[in-house]
Amino acid sequence: MSLQDFWDVFVLGVVLGSLYAVIAIGYTLVYGVLQLLNFAHSEVFMSGGFGGLIVLTVVVPAADPSGIQSAGYVLLGMLAGAALGGGVAYGLERVAYRPLRRRGAPRLVFLITAIGASFFIYNLAGKIFGRNASRMPSMYENKTLFTLFGAPINVTQALVVVSAVLMLILVDFVVNRTKLGSGIRAVAQDPEVASLMGVNIDKVVSRTFVLGGLMGGVAGFLYGTTTQVWYTMGFLPGITAFAAAVLGGIGNVRGAMLGGMVLGVVEAMTVEIWGDAWRYVGAFAVLVAVLMFRPTGILGERVARTA
Amino acid sequence: MSTVRDSKGRERVPSAASLRRVRWYQEARWKRLVALLVLAVVGAQVTGVQGTSTDIFYALGENFTGTGIWIWLALCVGVWVIREFLSEPVNRGWVASRDRVSQPVARVRGVWQADPRLRYGGGALLLVVLILLPLWLSTYWQQVMVDQIAIFVLLAIGLNVVIGWAGMLDLGFVAFFAIGAYSAAFWTGSLPVEPPVVLNTFLVIPIAIVTCLLAGVLLGAPTLRLRGDYLAIVTLGFHEIVYLAARNWTDFTGGSRGARMSERFVIDLGFWRFEWGLDPKPYYWLLLGFIVVIIFLFLRLEHSRVGRAWTAIREDEVAAASTGVNTVRMKLLAFAIGASTSGVAGVVYASKVAFISPENFVLLLSILVLAYVIFGGMGSIPGVLAGAALLIWLPEYLRDSVDPQDRFMYLGALLVVMMIYRPQGLLPSKRRQRELRLAEEKA
């Protein structure tokens, strides 16, 4: 692999990795407050793709949009993706998790409701919107913007990376600097004490889901613009993002960002060297290798409780 | 404390009374109405027409204007009215009828539990019914009984050891199933690679057990110090690697084109020869035999020193280790035993369907087996049997009454509803039930 190939692949990896990072945040936030693997998060991601698709099917983008129009379409798609993603995440928490939380059910039971909810949501989406992939209407001319180390960067790639980085900064700010964020961190540390200190746990948990859902929804829209939108689109990115969250140390927001980037680059490299068929092997091999030496992930400190 | 502004725009701290006041729309009854209306809208979509990808609004439009949504709305509002305004008489009737049913049931249960001879008799009767069952079924259902129910019951029993008894979350269980199936294919000479000797399928079973045992130890040894969710993701990754190897290592596995099995189960005693052919019934009896033997062995194991060590590890690993349980060895053992059960299932499956391809071992199956175990009741063999049988039977049964593409949607909804109202599973083990109750009291 020449140096030029390396940079080309690296750029692809960063684009993919920034999407994984944004999705991984949804997993890690929820894990932080509930110690729950939210398996249905991949369906939140998928709903984001459909949210964007629905709005852009209603507001048919002009054939030859000006710069401002393009920006408007993209923003509209993102908002719609975020809205539907956040809505689905909120509904999930209310219907599938809150009743169990009230009963103090063991965590494996949460896992099964998560799996059940995931089956339900993606099959319902398949039923309503049809089971073939739909292409997102074109919102801009996908030309090469500039080259970085000789690797061409097109509009979509720039859009994905820039918006992902913005969202990551936003989440980091929310978690570390706002009242909701201190609530999230308090509940993650010790829910019982947090509630004694006047933190409304139900509210914090629900908003954590919505925050993760907003991010996941936008990521779904962005993923949909890079490929297509279909009802099982959440599955593989969801699993990889979940691996990314674990790699970084689940429950740790910055760890999830790092893990996402690492897995994105590793995946792109694997595809380049061994071919597309082995796509996910490299990522999981890295995951296993890292976990063998750091059983709580790269940045993780807390040891996860047993199942 | 948050502040509010009064009519003159001055900031003031809200009084306790105003904070405690509940607005009408915050009352539980209106929230329940909203929830039921949402349920009606979702329900109308669930039972409505199939959409198409060429016009994504087609199904939404049809379902919001059709009669279905009005039926759903009427039903849900009706439920709400009964719940809010007529709950007294309905509740009284419900309690009375529940007592009428539960008292005789409790009496029968008392008699049943008092006499072990009755239980053995019941078990024997059940076994006889199970042996005779395929004679009454159509060929289609016989195939379902073998290819799906019996095979997955075997898998679920194996996974139950790992997750129900030792308490380790394994999301890659079907990988061992695949290893078992591919070793069957290899040793019967059905893969592109020539084996050293071509064996009778029965002889492959111990080999597959050993292979899966080794694979289980190989995966388990480096990862068992991971806990809970970390273990889950590593096992999931292991599954993905095995699956991709089966699909891409074309020289060895035949890749995505799959492998056709050249040998079947044969008993050849010279004077008498029996071959398991296209008829599913002999396979059913063979599998039933395996299941009965394995259940017997596992029940012995559950109440042995090993089983108690697993329980100790599941309930508190640190405490178990400090009382002298060799946790690493016991966890490895659970992993290996689960894996080898899965291997047996793999051999029989490969031989029965006579054609294996990587698509028979996708990740979804691992997740489904996990769902069967937890749905039935972790750690309880009767529960696992019932859970697996019911959850496999249901989608097959629904095949005729709903659109086949929607079956997993109903399965998902069933899982959610079931777990909310009965988190301990269908037929939970006593110990698990107690653990759950303790957790609930703590919450």
Image: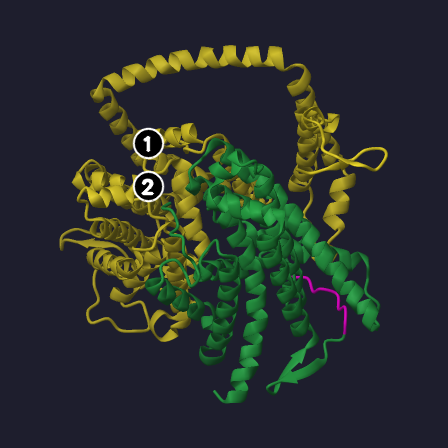
Chain colours: A green, B yellow
* Residue B18 shown left or right of residue B237 in the figure: right
Q: Amino acid at mark 1?
A: Ser
* Residue A234 shown left or right of residue B110 in the figure: right
Q: Chain of mark 1?
A: B
* Residue B8 shown left or right of residue B177 in the figure: right
In this picture, which residue range is highlighted in magenta? A133-140
Using the rendered image of the protein, determine whether residue B385 is visible from the camera's viewpoint: yes
Q: Is residue B325 above or below residue B420?
A: below
Residue at the image point whose x is 40% and y is 47% from the top: B369
Q: Is residue A138 magenta?
A: yes
Marks 1 & 2, CB-CB < 8 Å contact? yes
Instruction: Report the quarter where the N terminus of chain B lies.
Output: top right
Q: Find residue B164 and name its label.
A: 2
Q: Position of residue B344 (x, y in %)?
A: 27, 52
Task: Please name the predominant secondary structure of the magenta segment in the image.
Answer: loop
Residue at the image point whose x is 44% and y is 68% from the top: A283
Q: Chain of mark 2?
A: B
Q: Secondary structure at mark 2?
A: helix
* Residue B278 shown left or right of residue A128 in the figure: left
Residue at the image point whose x is 46% and y is 31% from the top: B422
Q: Position of residue A284 (x, y in %)?
A: 42, 65
Separation of residues labelled 1 and 2 (CA atoms): 10 Å
- Front-lying residue, B268 or B207: B207
Q: Amino acid at mark 2?
A: Gly
Mark 1 sits on what residue?
B429
